[in-house]
Image (spheres, rainbow, N blue to C red):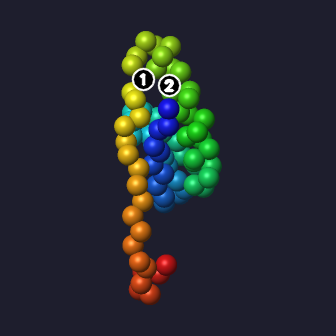
Amino acid sequence: MKYAIIIEKTDNGYSGYVPDLPGCVAAGDSRAETEDLLREAVPFHVELLRENGDPVPAPQTPVAVVDVPATETDGC
């Protein structure tokens, strides 16, 4: 199974979550650290759901990227 993850910049680092696994979250100092933490958290979260006899939600969140041309005023 492949779950989508969302990572967002915060005032003091990064936070991330898995839309299809409520409660599966992580926070780190960098984007890479947060992604690594989520990669560890997802299997652990699924394992706990199974151990508790709870249903494991199937991955359903689609992921896409939209390219938008940068302009000089975007600061990109």
Q: Nearer the viewer, residue 65 or 53?
A: 65
* Residue 53 in view, yes or no: yes
Give the mark nearest the N terminus, 2 or 1.
2
How far apart are the two marked residues, 2 and 1, measured between alpha carbons?
6 Å
Q: Which residue is mark 2?
A: 46
In the displayed orientation, state which residue is furthest to the bottom.
72
Image point (46%, 13%), residue name: 52
Q: Position of residue 8 (x, y in %)?
A: 46, 55
Q: Position of residue 57 (x, y in %)?
A: 39, 27
User: Is residue 35 left or right of 7 when viewed as pictured?
Assistant: right
Disc marking residue 24? none
- Dividing the picture into quadrants, the one containing residue 58 is top left
Image point (56%, 27%), residue name: 44
What kind of element bears circle 1? loop
* Residue 29 in view, yes or no: no
Q: Position of residue 67 (x, y in %)?
A: 41, 68
